[in-house]
């Protein structure tokens, strides 16, 4: 998953002194939710698909994929700036996967305690996958001689409370956007093998299938709560979470584009492709998605938001900063209110 994080400086273990890592590190944010409500989730109406998902998770197709002995050292030298981009990517990804592990582990613990064995088991199996992903990225960091003390980070985590509907919408999108990010990088590197400078990338294809399965589980959970996707509430939740997840992605990818350039990708095109694919995939789960096909307005606003964001970071003048902040806020509102299209298979 990719969005369950917030930017905050974190202490690195003693002896570690790379400033870009400290600046870029993301503290895993711990989310809690309406656990009692989650424990009342009725899967009966969706039992065949729920059991199929559970069986797939138990089958553990990637059991032997994340080989603990596979060497993860880089295949070629990078310049100092390129190394910063690579290491920052690894740290952000590792912490993001670890955040997913924390959320799923806590939900599984509470659901099992609440007597919901099947639901608890599904979350336990998703936590298993995220722990593997974080552990694998951590090994790539060790190959760069960077040690992250993940268990220590988890003891300092801030706690944020979200209603259950928010958790379901946002985690569904985190998983699906994570899936598209991994698979699009994988496809690009298969077409351009010279740009694949680390063996880590060879693991992305089956890896992304884990994220895809996790997203499908949240899609089933959303179906178990039909009120969450009906009427005005369903439209507002779809709009808000698609918009906020896309915005976070655009600002992160375009602002930290060096990593994608290192892979021979154009950051804004990669961002656009990830958004389009995630928006299309969400048609199968959400009642509404953004209309990205009829016009490029949403993407033009994305470009303006990224440019204004950059200017805001560089501007020191007080009044100029206020002007840029107002422009940014206006652009946010305009992008948020762009047209959406109903997803026919979701409408009763
Ligand atoms: Fe993951
Ligand atoms: Fe996941």
Image (tube, rainbow, N blue to C red):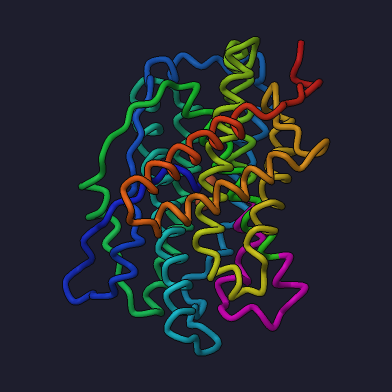
Asked where in the image residue 112 lies, by quadrant, the reply is: top left
Relative placement, left or right, of 161 versus 59 is left
Instruction: State yes or no: residue 202 in magenta.
Output: yes
Asked where in the image residue 213 lies, by quadrant, the reply is: top right
Q: Is residue 223 above or below residue 124?
A: above
Q: Which of 81 and 207 is in front in this view?
A: 81
Q: Start and end of the magenta stretch?
A: 187-209
Q: Residue at x 47, y 44 (%)?
A: 3
Q: Which of 178 and 336 is in front in this view?
A: 336
Relative placement, left or right, of 237 versus 274 is left
Point out the image quarter for the C terminus: top right
Q: Residue at x 35, y 34 (%)?
A: 31
Q: Nearer the viewer, residue 144 or 299?
A: 299
Relative placement, left or right, of 234 versus 1 is right
Q: Which residue is drawn at 47% across and 34% down?
A: 121
Q: Which residue is drawn at 55% across and 30% down?
A: 333
Magenta segment, prevailing SS (helix, strand or loop)? helix
Residue 102 in sight? yes
Instruction: State yes or no: residue 310 in magenta.
Output: no
Measuring from the top left, give residue 137's x and y in whole percent.
45, 65
**Residue that lies at the very extreme toward the left in this rendered image:** 14
Q: Is residue 311 above or below residue 237?
A: below
Measuring from the top left, give residue 266's x and y in whole percent.
67, 66
Residue 57 in sight? no
Q: In this view, does 256 lie above or below 130?
A: below
């Amino acid at each position: 998953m990719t969005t369950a994080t917030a930017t905050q400086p974190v202490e690195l273990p003693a002896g570690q002194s790379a400033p870009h890592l400290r600046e870029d590190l993301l503290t895993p944010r711990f989310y809690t939710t309406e656990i009692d409500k989650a424990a009342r989730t009725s899967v009966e109406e969706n039992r065949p698909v729920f059991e199929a998902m559970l069986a797939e998770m138990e089958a553990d197709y990637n059991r032997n994929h994340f080989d603990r002995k596979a060497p993860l050292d880089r295949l070629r030298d990078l310049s100092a700036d390129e190394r910063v981009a690579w290491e920052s990517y690894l740290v952000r990804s590792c912490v993001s996967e670890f955040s997913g592990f924390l959320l799923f582990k806590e939900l599984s613990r509470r659901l099992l305690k609440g007597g919901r064995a099947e639901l608890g088991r599904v979350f336990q199996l998703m936590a298993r996958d995220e722990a593997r992903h974080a552990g694998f990225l951590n090994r790539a960091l060790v190959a760069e001689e960077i040690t992250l003390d993940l268990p220590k980070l988890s003891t300092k985590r801030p706690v944020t409370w979200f209603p259950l509907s928010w958790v379901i919408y946002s985690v569904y999108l985190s998983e699906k956007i994570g899936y598209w990010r991994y698979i699009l990088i994988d496809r690009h590197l298969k077409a351009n093998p010279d740009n694949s400078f680390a063996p880590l990338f060879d693991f992305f294809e089956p890896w992304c299938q884990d994220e895809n399965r996790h997203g499908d589980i949240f899609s089933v959970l959303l179906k178990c709560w039909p009120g969450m996707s009906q009427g005005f509430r369903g439209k507002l939740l779809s709009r808000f979470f698609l918009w906020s997840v896309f915005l976070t992605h655009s600002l992160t990818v375009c602002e930290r584009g060096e990593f994608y350039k290192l892979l021979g990708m154009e950051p804004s095109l990669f961002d656009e492709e990830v958004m389009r694919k995630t928006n299309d995939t969400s048609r199968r789960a959400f009642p509404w998605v953004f209309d990205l096909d009829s016009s490029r307005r949403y993407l033009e606003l994305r470009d303006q938001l990224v440019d204004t964001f950059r200017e805001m970071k560089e501007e020191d003048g007080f009044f100029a900063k206020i002007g840029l902040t107002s422009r940014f806020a206006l652009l946010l509102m305009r992008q948020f209110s762009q047209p959406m299209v109903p997803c026919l298979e979701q409408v009763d």
